[in-house]
């Protein structure tokens, strides 16, 4: 796996065209500090790839020959994290630069599972060894801060020019080392518009069941990267193409296999709406997206209970419990998000029933108490946007959407202008529901020192 003395291609600044002004000030700060202390300092990964493609990188990752403890000692606000491989996060206010030590090629120092998955990898090495531990060739380009050259061991430069996504080394072995690389392949195909090479596709067909061994919390993190990067719908199609969606949302995947055209309509609108909001730099809450992805499974389970002659409200509650319970076993959706999903779902029949027989143009003062109560609900906008998506696919009468929409026009929070959106724009900052302020205990009166009581 680790070639002896690999000879890299060195691409000069005149050829690649990257300049220091394209790099974030915080990344330059880290690179400069490492360089001044005599350490190697390189940018690596997606930031180099995106710069070469004329895109602004979301993150800048640094790699060096300095050990984690040495890196941490150079920066006031830095912490070492990671179990499988230790890395350093250097903090600059709300920004963070990830610094990784070159990984080595000592296979005896790498702890693996019986399936070949890397469990622990704290083996440090040189750049000649580090490159073969990276996943895709287009992500394995090193920008040398010392001379501004790009170092390319694996023809990643050519892959960027030709639009190929090629895994480094034997694809089966690399997927066995980390099965999440298969999900990353789908994500990069969607984000970059690259074509995955045939051997990598075949290896996914052989290795996809290894995703069952990945921790649900890690699958949740990866699903958020996939669906909130601005290319959610394209990523969804790639997951389907590679037969990987079922390892994230098996209930949805099963329904799509039975009736793709019908089930995919709401999914498409939710994911395209998510992409639009990301493109407009508007806040996106995962709860809304997940509520849309799981709605079809929820509806199926609700119908099952209704056929068992269970009361409608009870059937809906049982279906919500079931779909969340079954999903979190596979993808560990945090409780704060499942609570919001429940609210969005539970308000759907309430909004439908409260608007029955109502006409447009009714003043708010003429609304019934229940309707006023719904308008004041903290998550009314989210539930309404979801209901209007359902109206677009024929699940709900458009008149119901229009009735409620007159009291909640779609506006940008800052400019007040109408924006194309299908998602709520007034979520709490971190996606948490609005909470009542905690009651404070009255302060105790200080003791009177003169009486010592």
Image (cartoon, rainbow, N blue to C red):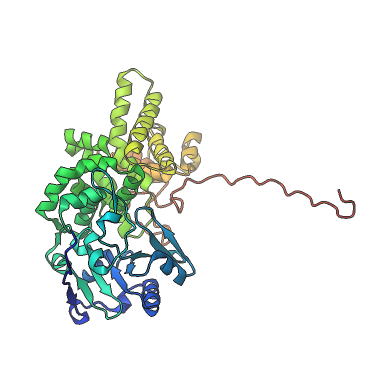
Identified at 30% across, 77% down, the residue is 145
Residue found at the very far right of the displayed protein: 451
Number of numbered tags placed on the structure image:
0
Residue 236 x/y as whole percent: 22, 47
Q: Nearer the viewer, residue 71 or 294?
A: 71
| Residue 395 can be seen, yes or no | no
Residue 333 x/y as whole percent: 38, 42
Residue 128, placed above or below residue 117: below
Residue 281 x/y as whole percent: 35, 60
Q: Nearer the viewer, residue 90 or 237?
A: 90
Residue 331 found in image quarter: top left
Q: Is residue 236 left or right of residue 119?
A: left
Q: Nearer the viewer, residue 277 or 59?
A: 59
Identified at 40% across, 63% down, the residue is 88
- State which quarter of the image contains the N terminus: bottom left
Identified at 58% across, 47% down, the residue is 437
Q: Is residue 257 left or right of residue 46?
A: left
């Amino acid at each position: 796996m680790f070639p002896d003395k690999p000879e890299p291609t060195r691409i000069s600044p005149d050829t690649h065209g990257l300049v220091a002004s394209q790099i974030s000030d915080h990344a330059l700060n880290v690179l400069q500090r490492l360089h001044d202390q005599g350490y190697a300092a390189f940018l690596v990964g997606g930031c180099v790839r995106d710069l070469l493609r004329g895109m602004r990188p979301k993150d800048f990752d640094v790699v060096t020959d300095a050990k984690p403890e040495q890196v941490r000692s150079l920066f006031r606000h830095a912490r070492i994290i990671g179990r499988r491989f230790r890395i350093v996060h250097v903090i600059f206010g709300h920004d963070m630069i990830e610094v990784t030590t070159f990984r080595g090629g000592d296979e005896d120092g790498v702890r693996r599972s019986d399936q070949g998955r890397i469990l622990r990898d704290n083996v440090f090495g040189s750049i000649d060894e580090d490159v073969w531990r990276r996943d895709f060739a287009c992500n394995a380009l090193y920008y040398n801060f010392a001379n501004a050259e790009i170092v390319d061991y694996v023809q990643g430069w050519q892959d960027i020019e030709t639009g190929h996504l090629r895994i480094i080394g034997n694809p089966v072995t690399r997927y066995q080392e980390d099965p999440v690389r298969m999900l990353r392949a789908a994500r990069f195909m969607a984000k970059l518009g690259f074509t995955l090479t045939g051997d990598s596709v075949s290896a996914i067909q052989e290795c996809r069941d290894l995703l069952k061994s990945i921790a649900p919390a890690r699958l949740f993190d990866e699903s958020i990267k996939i669906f909130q990067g601005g290319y959610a719908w394209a990523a969804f199609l790639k997951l389907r193409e590679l037969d990987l969606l079922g390892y994230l949302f098996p209930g949805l995947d099963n329904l799509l296999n039975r009736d793709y055209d019908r089930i995919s309509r709401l999914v498409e609108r939710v994911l395209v709406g998510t992409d639009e909001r990301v493109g407009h730099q508007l806040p996106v809450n995962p709860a809304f997206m997940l509520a849309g992805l799981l709605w079809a499974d929820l509806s199926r389970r609700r119908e099952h209970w209704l056929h068992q002659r269970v009361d409608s409200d009870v059937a809906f509650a049982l279906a919500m419990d079931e779909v969340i319970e079954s999903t979190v076993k596979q993808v560990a959706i945090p409780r704060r998000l499942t609570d919001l999903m429940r609210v969005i779902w539970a308000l759907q029949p309430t909004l439908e029933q409260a608007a029955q027989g109502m006409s447009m143009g009714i003043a708010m003062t003429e609304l019934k108490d229940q309707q006023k109560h719904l308008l004041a609900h903290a998550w009314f906008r989210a539930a309404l946007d979801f209901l209007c998506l359902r109206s677009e696919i024929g699940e709900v009468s458009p008149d119901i959407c229009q009735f409620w929409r007159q009291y909640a026009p779609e506006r940008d929070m800052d400019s007040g202008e109408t924006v194309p959106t299908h998602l709520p724009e007034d979520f709490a900052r971190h996606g948490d529901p609005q909470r009542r302020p905690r009651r404070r205990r009255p302060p105790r009166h200080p003791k009177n020192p003169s009486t010592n009581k």
